[in-house]
Amino acid sequence: MPDKTRRRFLTVAATGAAAAIAGCSGGSTDGDAAATDTRADGESDSEESSSDGTDDSGGTDNADETESGEMSGETLRLASGSEITSMDPVVKGNGGINQWAETLMRYDNGKLPPTTNLAADYEISDDGTTYRFELKEGVTFHDGSELTASDIVYCWERLAQSPKTQNNDDMLGGTFTVAHEKDKSANDPETAELSDYVPGSLAVRAPETHVFEFDVEAPFHAGLAQIASESAFVVYPENTVGDIEREGVETDGEYGYQEAFGTGNGGPKVAGTGPFQIETWSKGSKLVMTRHDDYHGTDPNVERIESVILSDEDAVYKRALNDNVDVFSVPSTKFDPASRSGMEEIGAGREVGRYTLENGTEVNTAEVGDIGVDTVLFNCDKVPKPVRQAFALVLNQDDIAANLYPDQEPAYSMVPPSIYPSSLGDFNSPSAAYEAHTAEGAMAQTPWGSDGYIWGRGESRIQEARQKVEDAGFDGEEYTFTIAKDPVSSAVGSRVQQKAQALGITVNVERADYGTLISKGVFEKQLDFYTLGDSAEWPESDNLLRFYHPNVSIDQASQWGERTEDGEWATEYMETAADAWQNNYVPNRGPGKENQRKRDMAYLATIETNWQVVQQIPLAIRVNRTYWTDDLDYTPPGVMGDKTYIDVQIDRS
């Protein structure tokens, strides 16, 4: 191995080893993500932790120079195979946000637990309902203004009520719920929806210039993790735009919406506190960010980040083959497991090694088991249950995960093994609980969950599926399957189309970017069924299951959950899932072993009910694979992802 290559690789390996010795990776023995260790005893200790000022290698946060003692001043070359839809933090699909904006808490290079970021310290009341953050003083936005608690009040209020928001469930929904008021008369007088939020009622305040406080409706076991992981909670200057109502507060806005978050009038002009600031954004072309010289943390090594926006992942890969990109991905159609070598675990759920590209070039690679699952999600109002069940019968997850992704593990639940509910049995890991429940029905909470996943493992049951469709009286149905613009989704689309033909069903495949899948699928409810991957923002099942009990799914995502004229749930499945969530989850969202057991009961009931009614079909457990050239000293992020390129060093000599 050339000296330069060896130095780059050993830097990564040594960094991970130090993190493991320091205890960051915990004691996982079966290759699960480090997330499992936060709840090995039924509790998470993340709420008790705060930053210790160390970086990913276990040293102090001052490694901002190259070996010669000078910043590299180089340009980091990136490329994306998907479009950036907006720079607005409250909109899904925002671009480069981990580089230019920050939250109160963070995951240090993707590692658990969350640590302080814009906050210098925090305190949670004994009853778990009030959070108090003391902010770092002297933190400046990219426009030169100083961060104050009023900026956070504005940003959180905007997340709750802006007409543009697609993330208000993260603070107004039924998990992490900031105290607020809803006006039921705004929509349906029988129920309170997210859109019924009363502007200005959010229980957030700035009692001092550098003190931010908020109240939650009930204690929540992962409040700090939610703030750390969700980009919607990033902070930008108060009154950046004037699209919210605040009594007694000026809200006209410094900029128009497109000027702040789009490309209008020289935009985007939104300012963050991150290590990099937006220089230019050309939609469909390029995003350029430059080093923020007054950054409050470790000075970034690189001067500039240029992210070219291309048509798809194949175009990104071609750029990598020509040595025109520094950090990239390899499309599933090009990935060859045999091209990996020297893979070794370095802690925090990561493996690193070498990978040989098809042109013979050797690069570095890292794999981390994402705490998420890729799925096919149905609009249950548009695709009847017998048809959904037929698709579940014919899709062979083992084949799809091994060959279409490829080389990933099949999924038989919306929740991946690393964070599976495990407190109700004697299991040595969440992964063992996952296998026992999905394969044998261990810990079953419903009559229909006692056999585990019922649609088959490692097989495609075409005859049974065809009979189910015929018995239901369907013949010649036609649906549109909307897929993401990546090679895996294209392969899944072809496989679904092929299997549907064997059932006498016509499936038309359309491609869309991620923002369109979210807006038209989840919010506008226009799509029949579509591909959607989901990764947990905190390491527990509720983050992935919160949209699939009928109290919520009736209005979002799957549209599952009808009521009778007298207001009762229309089926036993709906009633069981709704009751399990309402009785076992809602009152038990706080920390503690008994609360964990109750929540796990709700999680399992929700999973089992989805097996029966097929709101969605789990396909594969997500894996993040990253590749980078030997020009970089680069440490891959842990299981929580969201890499900030602050510690990257470049040497093109």
Image: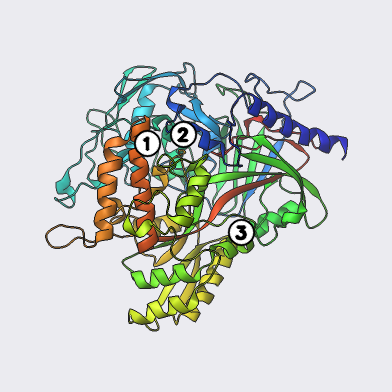
* Residue corresponding to mark 2: 39
* Residue corresponding to mark 1: 596
Instruction: Where is residue 352? Give x, y as percent.
Output: 71, 41
Quarter of the image for residue 317 reads bottom right
Looking at the picture, which amino acid does disc 2 mark? Arg
Q: Secondary structure at mark 2?
A: helix
Query: Which quadrant would the N terminus be assigned to in this image?
Result: top right
Residue displayed at 24% across by 37% down: 199
Q: Mark 2 touching mark 1, by CB under 8 A?
A: yes
* Residue corresponding to mark 3: 312
Residue 367 visible at all: yes
Outermost residue toward the left?
566
Instruction: Where is residue 218? Give x, y as percent.
Output: 28, 32
In this rendering, the answer to whether 374 lies above or below 266 is below
Q: Counting residues from the N terminus, which is met first, the one under dot 2 or under dot 1?
A: 2
Residue displayed at 52% across by 21% down: 51
- Residue 358, disc: none
Residue displayed at 48% across by 33% down: 40
Looking at the picture, which amino acid does disc 1 mark? Gln
Instruction: Where is residue 623? Give x, y as percent.
Output: 59, 49
Give whichever of 509, 432 is nearer the camera: 432
Question: Which mark lies nearer to you, 2 or 3?
Answer: 2
Q: Counting residues from the N terminus, which is met first, the one under dot 1 or under dot 3?
A: 3
Q: Mark 2 touching mark 3, by CB under 8 A?
A: no
Q: Is residue 587 left or right of residue 467?
A: left
